[in-house]
Protein backbone atom coordinates (compact mmCIF):
# COMPACT_ATOMS: atom_id res chain seq x y z
CA UNK A 1 0.00 0.00 0.00
CA UNK A 2 1.41 3.42 -0.92
CA UNK A 3 0.76 6.57 1.05
CA UNK A 4 1.61 9.90 -0.57
CA UNK A 5 1.71 13.27 1.13
CA UNK A 6 0.96 14.98 -2.15
CA UNK A 7 -0.70 14.15 -5.40
CA UNK A 8 1.42 12.73 -8.19
CA UNK A 9 0.60 15.81 -10.38
CA UNK A 10 3.50 18.17 -10.31
CA UNK A 11 2.77 21.66 -9.07
CA UNK A 12 4.86 23.97 -11.34
CA UNK A 13 5.26 27.73 -10.97
CA UNK A 14 6.28 29.82 -13.95
CA UNK A 15 9.01 32.32 -13.19
CA UNK A 16 10.19 35.36 -15.12
CA UNK A 17 12.25 34.48 -18.12
CA UNK A 18 10.31 31.22 -18.78
CA UNK A 19 11.70 29.27 -15.91
CA UNK A 20 9.64 26.71 -14.10
CA UNK A 21 10.05 25.87 -10.47
CA UNK A 22 9.16 22.29 -9.50
CA UNK A 23 7.94 21.94 -5.92
CA UNK A 24 9.64 19.02 -4.17
CA UNK A 25 7.49 16.10 -3.00
CA UNK A 26 7.86 13.30 -0.43
CA UNK A 27 6.44 9.97 -1.54
CA UNK A 28 5.72 7.41 1.15
CA UNK A 29 4.99 3.74 0.37
CA UNK A 30 4.03 1.67 3.35
CA UNK A 31 3.47 -2.07 3.62
CA UNK A 32 1.61 -3.21 6.69
CA UNK A 33 2.71 -6.14 8.75
CA UNK A 34 0.68 -9.33 8.42
CA UNK A 35 0.38 -12.09 10.93
CA UNK A 36 -0.63 -15.69 10.29
CA UNK A 37 -2.36 -18.28 12.45
CA UNK A 38 -1.35 -21.90 12.25
CA UNK A 39 -3.92 -24.11 13.99
CA UNK A 40 -3.71 -27.78 14.84
CA UNK A 41 -7.09 -29.45 15.35
CA UNK A 42 -7.60 -31.43 18.55
CA UNK A 43 -7.68 -35.19 18.21
CA UNK A 44 -10.06 -37.28 20.29
CA UNK A 45 -10.08 -41.05 20.16
CA UNK A 46 -12.59 -43.17 22.06
CA UNK A 47 -12.36 -46.94 22.03
CA UNK A 48 -15.23 -48.83 23.56
CA UNK A 49 -14.60 -52.51 24.10
CA UNK A 50 -17.77 -54.60 23.98
CA UNK A 51 -19.02 -56.09 27.21
CA UNK A 52 -18.31 -59.73 27.95
CA UNK A 53 -21.59 -61.61 28.04
CA UNK A 54 -21.83 -65.14 29.40
CA UNK A 55 -25.14 -66.99 29.05
CA UNK A 56 -25.63 -70.38 30.65
CA UNK A 57 -28.80 -72.22 29.82
CA UNK A 58 -30.19 -74.26 32.70
CA UNK A 59 -32.39 -77.08 31.36
CA UNK A 60 -35.74 -77.87 32.88
CA UNK A 61 -36.08 -81.04 34.90
CA UNK A 62 -38.98 -83.48 34.97
CA UNK A 63 -39.04 -86.16 37.64
CA UNK A 64 -41.67 -88.90 37.56
CA UNK A 65 -41.96 -91.33 40.48
CA UNK A 66 -44.15 -94.35 39.84
CA UNK A 67 -43.90 -96.89 42.63
CA UNK A 68 -45.27 -100.33 41.76
CA UNK A 69 -48.81 -101.22 42.73
CA UNK A 70 -49.32 -103.87 45.38
CA UNK A 71 -51.48 -107.00 45.10
CA UNK A 72 -52.02 -109.11 48.19
CA UNK A 73 -53.67 -112.54 47.95
CA UNK A 74 -54.48 -114.26 51.25
CA UNK A 75 -55.36 -117.98 50.72
CA UNK A 76 -54.97 -119.08 54.30
CA UNK A 77 -58.70 -119.47 54.89
CA UNK A 78 -59.12 -121.50 51.71
CA UNK A 79 -56.28 -123.83 52.64
CA UNK A 80 -57.69 -124.19 56.12
CA UNK A 81 -61.07 -125.14 54.72
CA UNK A 82 -59.42 -127.70 52.46
CA UNK A 83 -57.72 -129.20 55.48
CA UNK A 84 -54.24 -127.95 54.68
CA UNK A 85 -53.74 -126.05 57.91
CA UNK A 86 -50.46 -124.92 59.25
CA UNK A 87 -49.32 -126.06 62.64
CA UNK A 88 -50.44 -123.00 64.57
CA UNK A 89 -53.95 -123.02 63.09
CA UNK A 90 -54.25 -126.79 63.48
CA UNK A 91 -53.21 -126.60 67.12
CA UNK A 92 -55.64 -123.74 67.85
CA UNK A 93 -58.52 -125.48 66.06
CA UNK A 94 -57.84 -128.78 67.85
CA UNK A 95 -57.75 -127.05 71.20
CA UNK A 96 -61.01 -125.23 70.47
CA UNK A 97 -62.67 -128.44 69.23
CA UNK A 98 -61.50 -130.36 72.28
CA UNK A 99 -62.77 -127.62 74.54
CA UNK A 100 -66.14 -127.60 72.85
CA UNK A 101 -66.41 -131.40 72.98
CA UNK A 102 -65.48 -131.38 76.62
CA UNK A 103 -68.12 -128.77 77.41
CA UNK A 104 -70.77 -130.74 75.52
CA UNK A 105 -69.71 -133.99 77.27
CA UNK A 106 -69.94 -132.32 80.66
CA UNK A 107 -73.35 -130.90 79.81
CA UNK A 108 -74.59 -134.30 78.64
CA UNK A 109 -73.23 -136.03 81.73
CA UNK A 110 -74.87 -133.45 83.92
CA UNK A 111 -78.14 -133.92 82.08
CA UNK A 112 -77.97 -137.69 82.43
CA UNK A 113 -77.13 -137.33 86.11
CA UNK A 114 -80.14 -135.10 86.57
CA UNK A 115 -82.31 -137.73 84.86
CA UNK A 116 -81.00 -140.54 87.09
CA UNK A 117 -81.41 -138.39 90.19
CA UNK A 118 -85.02 -137.61 89.45
CA UNK A 119 -86.37 -140.80 91.07
CA UNK A 120 -89.57 -139.02 91.87
CA UNK A 121 -90.63 -139.47 88.26
CA UNK A 122 -90.56 -143.24 88.73
CA UNK A 123 -89.11 -143.75 85.29
CA UNK A 124 -86.28 -145.96 84.14
CA UNK A 125 -83.66 -143.33 83.52
CA UNK A 126 -80.97 -145.83 82.53
CA UNK A 127 -83.14 -147.42 79.84
CA UNK A 128 -84.07 -144.04 78.51
CA UNK A 129 -80.47 -142.94 78.32
CA UNK A 130 -79.42 -146.21 76.63
CA UNK A 131 -82.22 -145.84 74.08
CA UNK A 132 -81.17 -142.28 73.29
CA UNK A 133 -77.59 -143.31 72.80
CA UNK A 134 -78.49 -146.35 70.76
CA UNK A 135 -80.74 -144.42 68.41
CA UNK A 136 -79.15 -141.00 67.86
CA UNK A 137 -81.01 -138.34 65.92
CA UNK A 138 -80.14 -138.03 62.24
CA UNK A 139 -77.28 -135.66 61.64
CA UNK A 140 -77.98 -132.35 60.00
CA UNK A 141 -76.27 -131.85 56.67
CA UNK A 142 -76.17 -129.17 54.00
CA UNK A 143 -74.43 -128.60 50.67
CA UNK A 144 -71.32 -126.44 51.05
CA UNK A 145 -68.61 -125.41 48.70
CA UNK A 146 -65.10 -126.12 49.80
CA UNK A 147 -63.39 -123.75 49.88
CA UNK A 148 -66.21 -121.33 50.46
CA UNK A 149 -66.87 -118.27 48.39
CA UNK A 150 -64.75 -115.38 49.55
CA UNK A 151 -62.21 -117.54 51.35
CA UNK A 152 -59.50 -116.12 49.13
CA UNK A 153 -58.94 -112.51 50.16
CA UNK A 154 -57.58 -110.21 47.45
CA UNK A 155 -56.40 -106.71 48.26
CA UNK A 156 -55.14 -104.45 45.46
CA UNK A 157 -53.57 -101.10 46.24
CA UNK A 158 -52.92 -98.95 43.16
CA UNK A 159 -49.88 -96.75 43.16
CA UNK A 160 -49.79 -92.98 42.69
CA UNK A 161 -47.73 -91.18 40.10
CA UNK A 162 -45.77 -88.23 41.47
CA UNK A 163 -44.64 -85.67 38.92
CA UNK A 164 -42.17 -82.95 39.88
CA UNK A 165 -41.55 -80.24 37.33
CA UNK A 166 -38.82 -77.65 37.80
CA UNK A 167 -38.60 -74.86 35.31
CA UNK A 168 -35.17 -74.03 34.00
CA UNK A 169 -33.89 -70.67 32.90
CA UNK A 170 -30.86 -68.75 31.84
CA UNK A 171 -27.98 -67.45 33.95
CA UNK A 172 -26.56 -64.29 32.45
CA UNK A 173 -23.30 -62.71 33.59
CA UNK A 174 -22.20 -59.42 32.10
CA UNK A 175 -18.80 -57.77 32.53
CA UNK A 176 -18.61 -54.20 31.37
CA UNK A 177 -15.45 -52.43 30.21
CA UNK A 178 -14.66 -48.75 30.61
CA UNK A 179 -14.08 -46.76 27.45
CA UNK A 180 -10.48 -45.89 26.52
CA UNK A 181 -10.33 -42.15 25.96
CA UNK A 182 -7.28 -40.56 24.33
CA UNK A 183 -7.40 -36.80 23.79
CA UNK A 184 -4.73 -34.63 22.20
CA UNK A 185 -5.61 -30.96 22.59
CA UNK A 186 -5.24 -28.64 19.64
CA UNK A 187 -3.07 -25.51 19.54
CA UNK A 188 -2.80 -22.27 17.63
CA UNK A 189 0.55 -20.71 16.67
CA UNK A 190 0.84 -17.07 15.72
CA UNK A 191 3.62 -16.15 13.31
CA UNK A 192 4.60 -13.08 11.31
CA UNK A 193 3.76 -13.70 7.73
CA UNK A 194 4.90 -10.34 6.37
CA UNK A 195 7.15 -7.63 7.87
CA UNK A 196 5.94 -4.06 7.82
CA UNK A 197 7.86 -1.68 5.54
CA UNK A 198 7.94 2.09 4.98
CA UNK A 199 9.60 3.38 1.80
CA UNK A 200 10.24 7.14 1.52
CA UNK A 201 11.05 8.74 -1.84
CA UNK A 202 11.87 12.40 -2.46
CA UNK A 203 10.65 13.71 -5.81
CA UNK A 204 11.17 17.11 -7.50
CA UNK A 205 14.39 18.36 -5.96
CA UNK A 206 15.78 19.66 -9.27
CA UNK A 207 15.03 23.14 -10.71
CA UNK A 208 14.62 23.39 -14.48
CA UNK A 209 15.59 26.67 -16.19
CA UNK A 210 14.58 26.96 -19.82
CA UNK A 211 15.96 30.07 -21.79
Image (cartoon, helix red, strand yellow):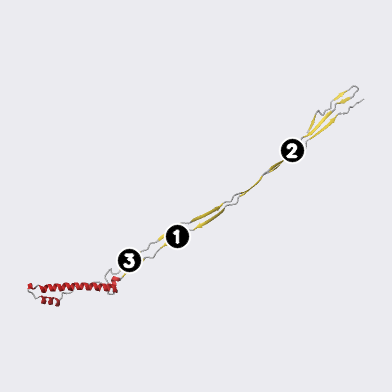
Check residue 35 in the rendering and tell me which mark sits there, or answer none.
2
- Residue under the image location 45 percent in, 60 percent down: 62
* Lower sequence index among marks 3 and 2: 2
Image location of residue 187, percent across then percent down: 69, 42
Query: Gap between marks 2 and 1, in whole Å?
Result: 85 Å
Image location of residue 172, percent across then percent down: 52, 54
* Lower sequence index among marks 3 and 1: 1
- Residue under the image location 86 percent in, 24 percent down: 13
Image location of residue 107, percent across then percent down: 16, 72
SS at circle 1: strand
SS at circle 3: strand
Callout count: 3
Residue 167, compared with residue 21, is above or below; it is: below
Query: Gap between marks 3 and 2, in whole Å?
Result: 116 Å
**The N terminus: image quadrant:** top right
Quarter of the image for residue 192 reads: top right
Between 14 and 48, the one nearer to me in the picture: 48
Asked if disc 3 and disc 2 are in contact, CB closer than 8 Å, the reply is no
SS at circle 2: strand
Is residue 93 at all visible to an observer of this figure?
Answer: yes
Report whether 45 appears left or right of 174.
right
Is residue 141 at all visible to an observer of this figure?
Answer: no
Q: How many residues crowd mark 2 within 10 Å: few (<14), some (14–19), many (20+)?
A: few
Residue, disc 1: 62
Query: Gap between marks 3 and 1, in whole Å?
Result: 32 Å
Residue, disc 3: 155
Between 123 and 69, the one nearer to me in the picture: 123
Amino acid sequence: MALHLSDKTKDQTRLEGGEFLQIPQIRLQQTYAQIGLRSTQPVQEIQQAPADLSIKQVPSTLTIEHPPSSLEIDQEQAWNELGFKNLNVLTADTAEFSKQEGIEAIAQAAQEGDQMAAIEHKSDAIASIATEKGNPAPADFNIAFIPSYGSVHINFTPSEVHIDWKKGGAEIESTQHKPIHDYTPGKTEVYLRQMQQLQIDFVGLNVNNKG
